[in-house]
Image (cartoon, rainbow, N blue to C red):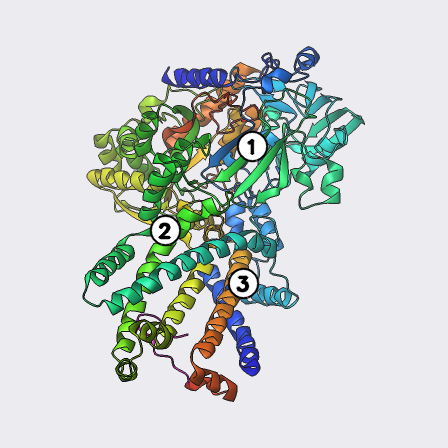
Amino acid sequence: MKRTLSFALAALLAVSLAGCGQSGSAEPAATTAAAAQETTAAQEQAEQAEPEATGEQGYREHLTIAFESQITDLDPQGVGNANEIHAKLFNMTHDTLFNYNVETGEIDPELATSWEWLDDACTQLHVTLRDDVTFHNGNKLTAEDVAFTLDRVQTDTQITDYYDHCEILGDHELTIVLKSGNVDFTYILSRPFDSIVNKAAVEADPDFGGTIGTGVWINNLDGYVAGDRIELIRNDNYWGELPPTKSITIVHIANASSRLMALESDEVQLIYKLEPTEIELARSNPDVEVNEFATTRLYYFAFNTSAGPAEDVNLRKAVAYAINKDDLIAAVGDTGAEVAKTFYGNAMSYYTEEFDEDITYDPEKAKEYVALCGNNTSLKLMVNTSDNIFKTLSEVIQEELRQVGITMEIEEVDSAGISANTRYDTATHEAMLYSIGLNTWDSDMGRLFSVGTNSNKAIVDDSRISELLLEGSACVDPAERGEYYKEIQAINNDQCYYLPLYYCSTTIAYHAGLQGITINPTGYFDYSQICLPE
Amino acid sequence: MHRYIIKRILMLIPVIVGVSLLVFVMMDMAPGTVVDIIGGEMSTEELAELNHQLGYDRSVFYRYFLYMKDLLHGDLGTSFIYKMDVWDLYMQRLPATLELAGASVLLAILLSIPLGIKAATGHGGLTDNVSMVAALLGLSMPNFWLGMMLIVLFSNRLGWLPSYGATDGIKSLILPALTIGTGLMATLTRTTRSSMLDVLRADYLRTARSKGVPEKKVVSKHALKNALIPIITIIGTQLGNAVGGAVVTENVFAWPGVGRLIIDAINQRDTTTVTGCIIMTTVMICVIMMVVDIIYAFVDPRLRAQYASGKTRKRAPKVRGGEAA
């Protein structure tokens, strides 16, 4: 209930903030699991044609947004870009084939006007493209650009595990052929990292050609200082709705206090992520609005189930019963956080809380499992030092485990170190604390269980889960799919490969009156329509 | 003098080789590589392929050899994180670093030297005591705290100056320069004072005074010139440090300097960027130190004569409170 309420509030917020452009953007069209999906958005596109000339009066021409992390690459398919910060930029500068609608949870048209699965196994997706879209360099969008973009994705397993090739049927028509069925593929293609780039531009300039998209905002490379700032100029030839703002600067201000002070002095108009201690301070300023909202980022505890002490399921269960998740949330001061009752995405269709009893805090039960472990009662926990939250969580967990008779040693390493030590084929960790931003489609859980991938931090090699994931992603019957995903959750709860801790909340703060932000619980915010009335 | 300059330039070669080797080996010893940062959720096969592409399946010395080969052709390499030439990356950040280093050192020179002289000539008086307490305060205040306080006052409360970035010309420069400059001022004031005190007690100044030379001239012409060597050394060292980047201040003011770039690159195990930037910083520091040595020669004719004869190793300027150049 709380989860539903949280996302409803986020959706409401999105609606309330999306106010400066014209109303009547594309409406929800496709259903999640329908084998045949067809959506025509021509009418809506016609409505979106031109910005109101008078709308530019009374709005600030230039806005500045401050991020806590650096923008290191402007190319959506650049290696190592798949994070929330870059997603926000690509949402502004590029377009995807499909748009995930945060209000309805459905897929809307974007560069694709209509699409249809050609077979029941969901392996062939027929797509028709808009014919009025031009890239920032003036080239027309064609099916070749889409095929080129998908062929270009080399290191994203969500694409490479399924995508085979494209069959180009015309300038604006193609069929995407998959190696195995994935009913969620349209959702996957709505991610900003799969934005369409111009083939000619990339071939002419492999380093910066990918920065040319079809989005509302054009990267101004003269105003790009890698890792520090990027200036964006409004694309007046954009095919859709235009905001009244003419230019935007995105800057990297790493220090949280400096970000807030820059906002308070109106040097920046939007900041992302406030320290918990600064939220009240920001709220006390009448010129600043603060929004705290639920996210799909799951903090979790992962055991190395392939080697070491955590091979023993009794030890894993003892740890599971020893952890009080409410204590963890209180310790990190995340007032908007929600306890995770199952290891699954809280915004996914088949998320269920019915396993609650399996992993509830119960020190006595933990002691019973400890007794079954014999001498195997010590564990080394690897913690990422780049985020203070992990350190706090590890200290609370250490004390809780001590109370049930488990000795836990904390090993601190930085991001690169933790990634190196937890690689699937060479993992040396015994247990670790980590977090993952889960998407809203169910097959996304495959990232955590997929054998041989770097995101499988519990080094799980469970043939039944692999089978269920494969069947679930190709199954078009919602009820049947639900059963597959429910079983995955049940297996994890029984085996305790991963212990779900909580879904965190996050905050944005902005100049009072700022409009045009679409908040997405996955963190892929859309600032394309951002504007500030004078 | 020319021979001396050529000699110093040639000395750069072993320094660069040593520094770059040290950076390569230390980065290799740290857990994880850039592949672990950009690898994200790749499969084992994809990671292995990326490792191969970036040369991480070969030994650190082999990678170093390849790097040095490119360096001989003037190529500092390409950043795996920023996907740009390291030279371009460095040059994007250098102007901001030089501005900040120059402004903070200039601020320190303009305020500290007169204050140090005044404190020395009025030894034990009000100015001396006040300046020494101020210097102690300047040394004691951490830069991150001072920077924050300056932002609160001048940006948030008064709205006079920008709180971050380097895009507002001289207005952007004032607060970060003041933050770094405060620490430099404290050191320089104390050095100037103590150096002047040493000289002011010298016999030749007593002689000058007894001959009726006005005190103002005694201080400005005779004492200051002889007290300058340690002051120049401190200024050179401070400028060298500042050119390497003031990481804390750059972080507080989101200043796009080299220091922040190097730290970010270290965190992301971007060895090419770290090595390239440190090589460039080494060159900058060597050049600054060479300029400092040349200035010594202008200040002290004895050193000029030594340079000319090529016996520079015998030179050992007396330094108080700082390292010899």
Q: Which residue is mark 3?
A: B280
Marks 1 and 2 close (CB-CB < 8 Å):
no
Q: Which residue is mark 1?
A: A248
Q: Which mark is residue B179?
A: 2
**B258 relative to B196 in the view: left or right:** right
Q: CA distance from mark 1 to mark 3?
A: 33 Å
Main SS of residues in magenta: loop
**B320 relative to A83 in the view: left or right:** left
Residue drawn 55% across and 78% down?
B5
Residue drawn 59% across and 22% down?
A243
Chain letter for mark 1: A
**Is disc 3 placed on a helix, strand or loop?**
helix
Total marks placed: 3
**Is disc 1 placed on a helix, strand or loop?**
strand
| Neighbourhood count class around disc 1 (C-alpha, 10 Å): few under 14, some 14–19, many 20 upward | many
Q: Position of residue B285 (x, y in %)?
A: 48, 66
**B116 relative to B247 in the view: left or right:** left
- Report whether mark 1 lies on the same chain as mark 2: no
Q: Quadrant of residue B223?
A: bottom left
Residue drawn 68% across and 16% down?
A49
B323 magenta-colored:
yes
Q: CA distance from mark 1 to mark 2?
A: 29 Å
Q: Is residue A64 above or below residue A530?
A: below
User: Which amino acid lies under the numbered mark 1 shown in the image of this protein?
Assistant: Ile
| Neighbourhood count class around disc 2 (C-alpha, 10 Å): few under 14, some 14–19, many 20 upward | many
